[in-house]
Amino acid sequence: MRDNPQMNENASHLQATRTLSLRSTDIDALGGAFFTQLHPTPLPDPYWVARSEVTTRQLGLSPNWMDGEDALALLVGNQVAQVPSPLATVYSGHQFGVWAGQLGDGRAILLGQTAQGQEIQLKGAGRTPYSRAGDGRAVLRSSIREFLCSEAMHGLGIPTTRALCIAGSDHPIYREETETAAVVTRVAPSFIRFGHFEHFSYRNQHDELRALADQVIDRHYPECRQSDRFDGNPYAAFLETVSERTAHLLAQWQAVGFCHGVMNTDNMSILGLTIDYGPFQFLDAFVPAHICNHSDTQGRYAFNRQPNIAYWNLYCLGQALLPLIDSQEQAIAALESYKQVFPAAFESRMCAKLGMKSPRLGAREAIETLLSLLAKDRVDYTIFWRRLSRHLAGDALDLVRDLFLDRSAFDAWMLSYLELTSSIGYAEMANLMLKTNPAYILRNHLGEQAIRTAKLKDYTELHRLQALLHNPFDESPGCAAYADFPPDWAERIEISCSS
Ligand code: AMP
Ligand code: MG
């Protein structure tokens, strides 16, 4: 399987574009059934809130250009004279398990594509034909969360859409209370979702369905054309590869304790990227059934249900691709791969967290026992893993042991763990674990602190957090508070779909 198409960290081979030069996107070539061409709605008196230096570099842009007024005007949607064909795409989807019909980019506008094939999308750029009752805007609060989390996921090595910058404006936006507007510039090789395929399939537009699948395969999954699997059926191979990618993504989410919050099929990337950051949360205490989305009253998207939900979503994709695959057996066989790949990928991620380069006999049981102990005592998930890593590097065991109420159960687990890993040196384990178990994650309360000060136009906290999250495995001097337990008020933060 190929790696996810992340941007190359070392962009030195790329020609420095300096300014953002855009051509029309792939989807533009597919024709009018797929999108509506339109310009963003200008945002009054914009100003910079945050920029990602890393994404700037990876796009080959000059930081000087990003500093200037031209960049701000372009990336807030106020100056699109040189953009050949900005557009909003149409998609449908299943929301909370129910067919929702047509949705589409209700507030996201694709500006274009860079020469290196990265699409640039403005989120919060104004109304589109797919806005339904929405205002086409995004508030500063949710834009900061999306920006920080995109860059945090990248820092953690988890496939994600990226964020280049946030621009704000004092323009009022009405949600539960009056807030202000912002635009996040998102970057990805493609923003196509499962819901794009569902859209054309449910409408029996099979020519469009095929054109979309062919383009996505040719551009992102060319190996599916060469595959001998499924008697050379590229669409079945495509479904299988997307299933595998999604399985790897979910293994990473579960291992790091990431709860997406709204895993509707329109929020599932066809490239296996984390996409659409809304009411997400990184777990504080390890509560497997944690529901991070205040609007999810049934707990459909609870943390421990995510792997099954991903499979359910893939099933919807399989259903949508059935007219192309043309064989129910092949579609089911292609989806079956998820059931093998997810548990294996999860075990392998968890073994790395425990200092083992690869799974070994007894590892699965050790992981299960540990997770049940963490759940029983509601231990802080990230702090546990980091302290365990540091113990292997020489810190006192009590720092880990004190996290548990049932110390004798922990002692028994620790003994079995040391036995399981007895053939590996402590230094070797610590080395792997400190690179696998982050010190910093985007906890809700950290995001909240950055948002509160940003609303007062003080971005110091936001920028500090951004820098820490970019290197989540490196402990920065003077930043211990960012790696500490959440304060009591963190439990009372309610994050809903309102954004
Ligand atoms: P989400 O729950 O954020 O994935 O959004 C679901 C659908 O609602 C998508 O079609 C979005 O484009 C649309 N949407 C969400 N918020 C807004 C808004 N403020 N204005 C217009 N459309 C929106
Ligand atoms: Mg969405």
Image (tube, grey):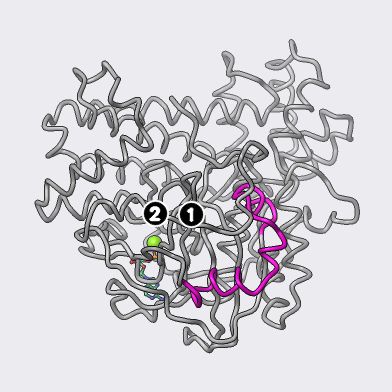
Residue 385 is drawn in which quadrant? Answer: top right
Left or right of 363? Residue 308 is: left
SS at badge 2: loop
Residue at image location 63% in from the left, 36% down from the top: 13
Between 166 and 174, the residue placed more toward the observer is 166
Residue 151 point in image, percent of width and height: 62, 53
Contact between labelled residues 1 and 2, with CB atoms less than 8 Å apart: yes
| Prevalent SS, magenta region | helix
Quadrant in the picture for the N terminus: top left
Using the image, determine if residue 437 lies above or below residue 483.
Answer: above
Which residue is denoted by mark 1 in the rendering? 260
For the record, the magenta segment spans: 52-80
Using the image, determine if residue 410 lies above or below residue 348.
Answer: below
The verdict on residue 410 being magenta is no
The verdict on residue 64 being magenta is yes
Residue type at mark 2 is Met
Residue type at mark 1 is His
Q: Quarter of the picture for ligand 1?
A: bottom left
